């Protein structure tokens, strides 16, 4: 017998959160909190996620619900009370928020505008959208990671490092930001970059990019066997990727 759908949705949401995909995580946390058994941690996680996208009243509601259900003293109850105190101060000084779905849709649209600009090579436009979004969503690790990636593509390595480090401060488990930090530091030394690729793999063993990049660095450091193992793992994760196929052909020739 499989897991209840609300448990599956909650676990999927945690994974998305680790990846920094906050909007997908919110959708799944909402599903978990409104289906199946009513579990306290689903409300806690949803409240914390709402904070990241500026839905303060919704965050307050979910954290209050969590505290109603979770009567034992735990680190989570202490964190929830601290977050509520901060939220109440912010809400007292802010005007009413738009309806939650309207706000989320606006956030999605701005993210998509930035991604479309990146795909089109309009990096200055993408950076402008993301910088404005970062002002509205200062707790979003996804915004910081994307800003770092834009700076990385523009060759602005110090600025990229700053944003990737901010993303990791907001979400220490964010494997993609850890991988990108390795890319940004690669010019300063392969060994330093490798440490970040390895950390990314520790945080998410299925992070394809980290396995691919670790292989490249290991090959440069003279560890051909390690490089081959990394590329084989990358190929297991994404079998159709032409870049990893090319590296494998080189390593196995």
Image (cartoon, rainbow, N blue to C red):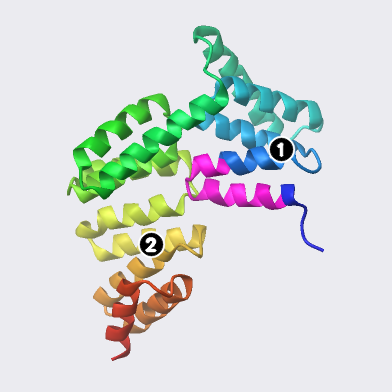
Residue that appears at 24% across and 49% down: 152
In front of the other: 123 or 14: 123
Is residue 83 found left or right of 252 in the rendered image? right
Q: Position of residue 12 (x, y in %)?
A: 61, 52
Please state, as top left, top right, bottom left or bottom right, where the N terminus lies in the image.
bottom right
Give the extent of the magenta segment: 7-25
Q: How many marks?
A: 2
Circle on res. 102: none
Q: Position of residue 107 (x, y in %)?
A: 44, 31
Q: Which residue is label 2 attached to?
A: 197
Circle on res. 33: 1
Q: Position of residue 178 (x, y in %)?
A: 39, 53
Residue that appears at 20% across and 58% down: 187
Which residue is the extreme one toward the bottom? 253
Closer to the eye: label 2 or 1: 1
Tell me whether circle 2 and circle 1 mark residues in contact (CB < 8 Å). Answer: no
Nearer the N terminus, badge 2 or badge 1? 1
Residue that appears at 32% across and 83% down: 224
Q: Position of residue 44 (x, y in %)?
A: 67, 34
What secondary structure is marked by label 1? helix
* Within-10-Å neighbours for mark 1: few <14, some 14–19, many 20+: many
Please state, as top left, top right, bottom left or bottom right, where the C terminus lies in the image.
bottom left
23 is within the stretch colored magenta: yes
Which secondary structure is most common in the magenta stretch? helix
Is residue 120 found left or right of 164 in the rendered image? left
Residue that appears at 50% across and 57% down: 203
């Amino acid at each position: 017998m499989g897991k209840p759908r609300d448990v599956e949705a909650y676990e999927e949401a945690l994974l998305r959160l680790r990846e920094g995909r906050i909007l997908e995580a919110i959708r799944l946390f909402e599903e978990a909190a409104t289906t199946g058994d009513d579990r306290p941690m689903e409300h806690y996680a949803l409240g914390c996620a709402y904070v990241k996208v500026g839905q303060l009243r919704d965050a307050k509601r979910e954290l209050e619900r969590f505290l109603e259900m979770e009567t034992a003293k735990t680190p989570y109850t202490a964190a929830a009370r601290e977050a509520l105190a901060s939220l109440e101060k912010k809400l007292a000084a802010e005007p009413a928020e738009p309806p939650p779905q309207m706000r989320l849709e606006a956030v999605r649209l701005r993210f998509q505008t930035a991604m479309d600009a990146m795909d089109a090579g309009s990096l200055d436009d993408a950076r402008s959208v993301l910088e404005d979004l970062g002002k509205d969503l200062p707790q979003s690790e996804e915004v910081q990671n994307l800003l770092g990636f834009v700076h990385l593509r523009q060759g602005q390595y110090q600025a990229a490092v700053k944003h990737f480090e901010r993303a990791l401060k907001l979400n220490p488990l964010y494997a993609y930001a850890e991988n990108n930090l390795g890319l940004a530091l690669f010019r300063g030394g392969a060994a330093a970059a490798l440490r970040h690729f390895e950390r990314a793999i520790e945080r998410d063993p299925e992070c394809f990019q980290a396995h691919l990049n670790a292989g490249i660095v290991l090959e440069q450091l003279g560890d051909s066997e390690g490089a081959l193992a990394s590329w084989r793992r990358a190929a297991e994760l994404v079998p159709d990727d032409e870049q990893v196929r090319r590296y494998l052909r080189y390593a196995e020739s």
